[in-house]
Image (cartoon, helix red, strand yellow):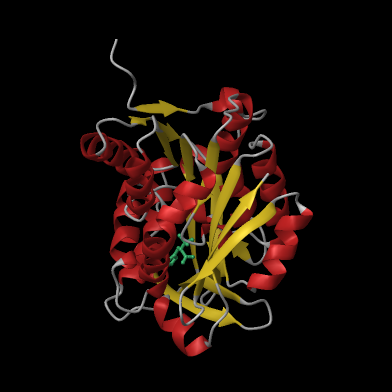
Amino acid sequence: MPPQLVKILNDSYQAVKNDGQDVIAGLTKNPKTLPPKYFYDDYGSELFEQICALPEYYPTRTEASILEECADEIAELTGSRELVELGSGSSTKTRLLLDAYQKIGNSFTYIPTDVSGGILKNSVLELQEKYPDFSIQGLLGTYQQTLTYLESTPAALRTVCFLGSSVGNFPPQEFDSLLTQITKSLEPGNYFLLGIDLQKPKEILEPAYNDRQGITAAFNLNMLSHLNWRFQGNFDLDVFNHKAIYNQAESQIEMRLYCQENVTFSLETLDLKVTFQAGESIMTEISRKFDLGILQTKLEAKELKIKKVWTDPKKWFGLILCQA
Ligand code: AVJ
């Protein structure tokens, strides 16, 4: 049998089956929220790729510029034979790391993981062609499912990477438990590579999340169309508006969808009715902006020893390499 391109992490890795419970919890809260993982159906992942290329959206190209400088060093320092990536998307930036590991010439396994099956399968196919000597195994699942799986399959020379500042989606407490779970997925000596967006003026941050072409707006609204197909919903995208603001006190971007009318929608398979007052919003995402020093202390407290830290000349983005 040919190897599976993508292994599906199903609920056997999860104690409780929970599909949609997080949607119910968020939409019955006041104020309403939704988990950012619902951005990423296949179309949402495609929109996110477009965001990464926007002139206002600096994180992707800034992180790539740092990786261009330090990928060889990371490959040498870690000497890893396995790279697991959380939320790999198209794996575009990761190719800089894969190139560096390829130069070293050891046998090597790359494990991209994502919640979007379409983009994951396509990138596994492309990467297998570009890196014929690497073993490439996609994992389809949430961060939690992936980390639980990793814990059950330890590897001596493993690096787990979490790029693009996706950790910024986690509020402080959840971030804390995520770090605990990441530590559990690592054996002593394994590495963790973390990409984080750093604090900077509102004048740079807000345009990055309210782009002039409206791609971020389409990305935000697509969450409702994802819920419509996944849970037989009837959200009318035309009555919602996108807006992102920088909450200076919390150092986070907050992205919301504002409902323009008094209206009720339903999600049939969740047996849920959701009523909105005109002007009411759903918060779909927070994107935290970090202080490099505070974060380093936090990682050390989680028994992740800082090996090396890189930034760009403007100090807009940081890359931290830790060892368990
Ligand atoms: C993928 C979570 C890192 O927070 O910048 C981009 C998602 N949302 N534009 C971010 C996002 C709106 C992105 N992360």
- Quadrant for the C terminus in the image: top right
Q: Residue furthest top?
A: 1
Residue 122, given in percent of the width and then of the height, sits at 26, 39
Task: Specify whether residue 83 is in view.
Answer: yes
Camera-side residue of 121 and 179: 179
Q: Position of residue 262 (x, y in %)?
A: 50, 71
Instruction: Report the side of 118 relative to 109 (left or right).
Output: left
Total numbered circles: 0
In which quadrant will I find the N terminus?
top left
User: Which residue is at 30% across, 73% downward?
Assistant: 54
Image height check: is 3 above or below 275?
A: above
Tell me the residue at 68%/82% (across/down): 249
Q: Nearer the viewer, residue 51 or 18?
A: 51
Quadrant of residue 188 in the image? top right
Which residue shows up at 53% across the image and 88% down it?
A: 201
Indicate left or right for 53 with 188 as reference.
Answer: left
Q: Nearer the viewer, residue 89 or 261?
A: 89
Q: Nearer the viewer, residue 207 or 244?
A: 207
Q: Residue 96, position in %: x, y?
A: 34, 53
Above or below: residue 260 compared with residue 79: below
Asked whether residue 266 appears in the rendered view, the answer is: no
Return the x and y of residue 65 as percentages of the image width and height.
37, 68
Ligand 1 location (quadrant):
bottom left
Furthest residue in direction left, as rendered: 129
